Structure formats: C-alpha cells, structure tokens
Amino acid sequence: MNNVKAGKEMKLIINGKTVEFENSTSAIKSVLTMIQQVLDQETLELSHLIIDGIPVYQDYENYLNERINIITEIVAETLMLKPLIEETLGSAFVYIGNAIALLKPLADAFYHFPGQDTWNQLADLLEGIGWLMDTMSRIDEIEQLGQYLPNYDIWNEYVQAMKTLHVQIPELEQALISKDHVLIGDLLLYEILPVFEIAEEKLRFLVPSGGTNAS
C-alpha cells in the first residue's frame, strides 16, 4: 500500500524554508524531525500542518503514513511562542476573573433549587476549567519556559494552585452524579473559588501590564 513510484517527491514548507523529501514512509520521521528542529532553533510553536490544502491538527505521523503515496506539499503553520503564551495567559486571566464573579451566585443557586440555567452554567464552568488545565499543561511543557515569562517562580505557584483542581473536580463530578446540590454549592464556594482567587492573583504578575490590557 505504501510502495511509491521512484522519483516522486513532496515539499515541506516551514517558516520560509522549502525542503524536498521522497514520498516514502521512511521519510516521514525526517519530515517531523526537521519541523521540530526549526521550531527549536527559531523559538516557534507548531500550530498545525496544511497537507495538500487540508488543515491537520493532530496525529501527523498517521495522517502522513496513510497518504504518503499522493502527498505533494506539507506546510507547517507556526506561531511565535512569547506572543502565544502572553495571549493565552491573558485569556486565562480574563476567564478566571469572570468565573470568580459567577461562582458565589452559582453556589447560592445550588443551595436552593437549581434550574436548568444553573446546570448549564455549571457545565460551562467545567468546560472552562478543562480549558484552563489543558493550556496550563501545554505551556508548562515548553522547554526553557522561564525566558518567556516575567517571573517563573510565580508561574510555578500558579501551576501548583491549579493542580489542586485535579482533586476537586472528581469530587464535583461525583456530586453531580448523585445530585447533591448542597455539596456542589460547598465545593464551588469553598474549594473552586479560593483556587481561582489565587490563580487570578498569580496571573496578574504574568500577563502584560498586570492584566489591565487583557480583554
């Protein structure tokens, strides 16, 4: 299935550079290695690949392997790390600030009889927390992260605060399953809210202009 005609080639285009590779499964790792080398050398983050005009956001090796016979062009879309980190942290700062304003009335609603809007708000909150945890993990995995942040120690304090949610979210999910409204209110008010307040304080030191330009 993956046998190719001799002489057939595909182009890799990344950050203004074009390199040709044979259309063979053995070249796939070379393509991905070259992408990573350029990212490391030029302090970039990979956004996604555009393979013959089709955006691909994950499982690059499998996608390439399945279509290696017909691929002609691979474009690596990259992002500058520092602006990307600043934008992500700014969005997290705004989201957490908005969530803090929501948490007390949301907890109060669960202490009474919660309506459908209340359950919807809780679902949105859990989705938002998932996004916060995912972006935190992605940023924390960046090599030499300290050079992109104004204070690496405060970043670590933010990470440690957010990681406590790994314990609280399963408790909240269990309370959801059992429909324990009072416990849901308690977890929102006494567990989630304090973490968000700490996280907002830490992010204030990490986003440009102390968060005043975040929107």
Image: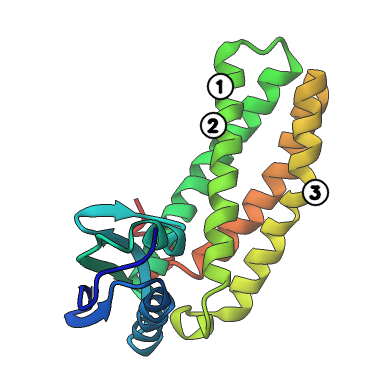
* Dot 3 amino acid type: Val
**Residue 38 percent across, percent down from the top left:** 34, 84
Q: CA distance from mark 3 to mark 1?
A: 22 Å
**Residue designated by label 3:** 167
**The label number, if any, that marks residue 185 in the structure image:** none
Say whether marks 1 and 2 touch (CB < 8 Å): yes
Q: Secondary structure at mark 2?
A: helix
**Side (left or right) of 175 relative to 28:** right
User: Label 3's element?
Assistant: helix
Instruction: Report the amino acid beneath label 1.
Output: Asn
Q: Secondary structure at mark 1?
A: helix
Q: Residue 209: in sight, yes or no?
A: no
List x then y, in percent, for residue 19.
22, 83
Amino acid type, residue under disc 2 in the picture: Asp
Crowd band around label 1 with a 10 angstrom C-alpha radius: few (<14), some (14–19), many (20+): few
All told, the count of numbered labels is: 3
Above or below, comparing residue 147 to residue 57 in the picture: below
The numbered dot on residue 120 is: 1
Q: Which residue is painted at 69% across and 51% down in the image?
A: 195
Nearer-N-terminus badge (3/2): 2
The quarter of the picture where residue 99 lies is top right
**What residue sits right under mark 2 in the picture?**
124
The alpha-carbon separation of the residues under discs 1 and 2 comes to 6 Å
Q: Quadrant of residue 69?
A: bottom left
Label 3: few (<14), some (14–19) or many (≥20) C-alpha neighbours in 10 Å:
few
Query: Where is the N terminus found, in terms of image quarters?
Result: bottom left
